[in-house]
Image (cartoon, helix red, strand yellow):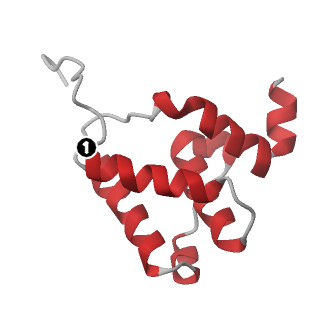
Amino acid sequence: MQGETARPDRCMNDFERAAFERLLKLAKRDTGQCRIVANFILAWWNAGSLGGFDLADLFALDHAISSDMATIVVCLSRNSMAFYPEEYRSDIEAVIAQWRPDIWNASR
């Protein structure tokens, strides 16, 4: 937007950060629910190359997990510009390596 400068506050608040960290921890594990969480995080990181997220997958999740995802969606929705959790880059790269090894290996 004209006249709008990059806002340093375009980040997660403590509640949102805690939800994201719980999701990230799950995404590094190896279960069906963890795969869904990984898909959610990777769709945010780069849906074009890492794949999208199927909303129907929410029905396969425990309520606490889907609530954490909803928290992140609300976080994203209040920003007028996209932002990505760059401070978690190494964690997200580990998720890419685990769940998208072909993509990860091709990028190395």
Res 30 → quadrant: bottom right
**Residue 32, horizontal then vertical, whole percent:** 71, 73
Pick the residue in front: 12 or 4. Answer: 12
Mark 1 residue element? loop
**Residue 106, horizontal then vertical, whole percent:** 86, 30
Badge 1 density bin: few <14, some 14–19, many ≥20, Cα 10 Å: few
Pick the residue in front: 81 or 37. Answer: 37
For the point 26% across and 32% down, which residue is it? 10
Pick the residue in front: 37 or 21. Answer: 21
Tally the marks: 1
Left or right? Give the position of 42 relative to 6: right
Tell me the quarter of the image containing the N terminus. top left
**Residue 22, horizontal then vertical, whole percent:** 48, 56
- In the orientation shown, which residue stands out farthest toward the bottom? 59
**Which residue is under mark 1?**
13
**Residue 37, horizontal then vertical, whole percent:** 58, 61
Amino acid under label 1?
Asn
For the point 57% across and 30% down, which residue is it? 89
Rendered view: 83 above or below 99 = above
Rendered view: 12 above or below 57 = above
Res 66 → quadrant: bottom left
Left or right? Give the position of 31 relative to 10: right
